[in-house]
Image (cartoon, rainbow, N blue to C red):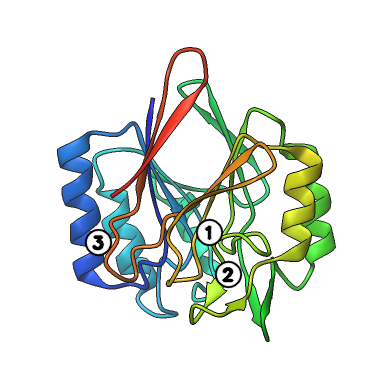
Amino acid sequence: MRIYAVADIHGKQARIERIRKVLLDLKPDVLVIAGDITNYRQAQHIIEQLNQMPVPVLAIRGNSDLPRVDRLLDEHPNTSSLDLREQIINGVKFAGASGTIPVPFSSRISLREQKALTALTTLVKEDSVLVVHSPPRGILDEAFGRFHAGSQRLHQLILQRRPRLVICGHIHERPGVAFVGRTTVVNCGVARRGNGATVDFDPEGSFKVEML
């Protein structure tokens, strides 16, 4: 089972074409997008392009995506919103939460953050892949290379629920791999030079992450 994970497309055609090329080259089983799919505009056109990708697409909204992006994802046969729901592909469980609200030197998951976190507490298990836009506080979240801007409550949720993998983006300067306890965190943003990340699961459930 191979996941190809990206974030921070921001509606840019060149990034969509880069993602398509990686999909054709590496042939993953699923494309996971951790938010900022659009840049507030042309949502329908961008989701239609994602719907034409050669693998299923699971996605959540980021702070540059209007709320209707979740609905558009669900209206197309090859794309699905992961917002506060679980989906299983090839035995791997995915759960997610749409949205991020940047505040000075921090991020919140949404206006109704506690409600979202309560729902995630039920959904997220130790064998889950959690997809969110913001990184957890203190992990791959240094905005401008200096200020930690991740979500403190997300960090606490990860420590409590211990998912095996968290896929995120949002902080363009910090793509990479890190850990919160036993949980692997992957910031897979493509807003700068990166091409996202692959995650390869073996039949026993262990996995290997490669930044592209």
Quadrant where the image shows the N terminus: top left
The first of marks 1 and 3 along the sequence is 3
The first of marks 3 and 2 along the sequence is 3
Q: Under tag 1, what secondary structure? A: helix
Q: CA distance from mark 1 to mark 2?
A: 8 Å
> Which residue is identified by label 1?
71
- Label 2: how many Cα within 10 Å (few below 14, some 14–19, many 20+): some
- Amino acid type, callout 3: Ile
> Which residue is identified by label 3?
16
Seen from the viewer's position, the closer of residues 70 and 182 is 182
Which mark, by number, is residue 67? Answer: 2
- Amino acid type, callout 2: Pro
- Label 1: how many Cα within 10 Å (few below 14, some 14–19, many 20+): few
Determine the residue positioned at 41% across, 67% down: 8
Up the image or down, 64 lies above or below 153; here it is below
Residue 208: percent from the left, percent from the top? 42, 31
Up the image or down, 165 lies above or below 100; here it is above
Q: Nearer the viewer, mark 1 or mark 2?
A: 2
Q: Nearer the viewer, mark 3 or mark 2?
A: 3
